[in-house]
Amino acid sequence: MRVIAGTSRGRRLVTFKGRDVRPTPDRVREALFSILQSRLGDFSDIKVLDLFSGSGALAIEALSRGAATACLVENAPASEKIIRENLERCQLTEKAKITTRDVFLALRDFSPESFDLIFLDPPYGRNLAERAILEISQQRVLCSNGTLCAETGADEILPEIIGRLKIFDRRRYGSIMIHFLCNEGLT
């Protein structure tokens, strides 16, 4: 796994051994960021939240492309170690904050409209994506014109509207589905 573009382009990232964690493949990240770039334009000044961050690859890609800051939330101490190593490899440590805590508890600590871009990549098949999106909506941590990207298994169905957030696009990449959401009334 490597960083696709930006200041850290080509840098290899440390990943997990085994099948418990499934990082987003390079080709899916490349497609995701192409879609985001067409929607958001320049990533400069964007504040990113990466929930269930695993290796930190999504936040690191956003930082490499110019995002101002990123907060990575992951409850596994082993993930925290890998995230730190990846941030150091990419020389992005100063722009990132790692929170080792349950995602649902961490979401209650953020101020309203704290993030322009939120990545959500929970373990598949546990209904965590829908729960997390509802919590994000209730806590109002996504900026009014922000974008949320939720990754699920292709067989997981999310409702079109979850709380105040609405799906405006979905893309399938093999066994992966990426759902793009924004605040209801915006597309």
Image (cartoon, grey):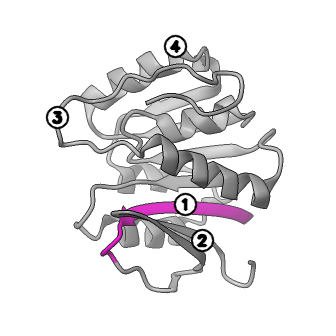
**N-terminal label among 4 and 2:** 4
Badge 2 crowding class, 10 Å Cα cut-off, few under 14, some 14 to 19, many 20 or more, is many
Residues marked 1 and 2 touching at CB (< 8 Å)? yes
Q: Which mark is residue 88?
A: 4
Mark 3 or mark 1, which is nearer the start of the sequence?
Answer: 3
Does residue 114 appear anywhere in the picture?
no
Alpha-carbon distance for marks 3 and 2?
31 Å
Badge 4 local density, few (<14 within 10 Å), some, or many (20+)?
Answer: few
- The residue wearing badge 3 is 18
What is the x, y in percent for residue 47? 69, 44
Name the residue: 41% across, 42% down: 53
Residue range in magenta is 143-156
Question: In the picture shown, does residue 144 fall above or below 119?
Answer: below
Circle 1 sits on which residue? 149
The answer to whether residue 130 is above or below residue 113 is below
Residue occupying image coordinates x 38% and y 63%: 174
Distance CA(mark 4)–CA(mark 1)? 25 Å
- Ranked by sequence position, the earlier of labels 1 and 2 is 1
Residues under labels 4 and 2: Cα distance? 31 Å
Three-letter code, disc 2: Leu
Q: Quadrant of residue 104?
A: bottom left
Q: CA distance from mark 1 to mark 3?
A: 25 Å
| Residue name at image x 42 percent, y 44 percent | 25
Image point 55% across, 60% down: which residue?
149
Name the residue type under label 3. Gly
The reply to whether callout 3 and callout 2 are in contact (CB within 8 Å) is: no
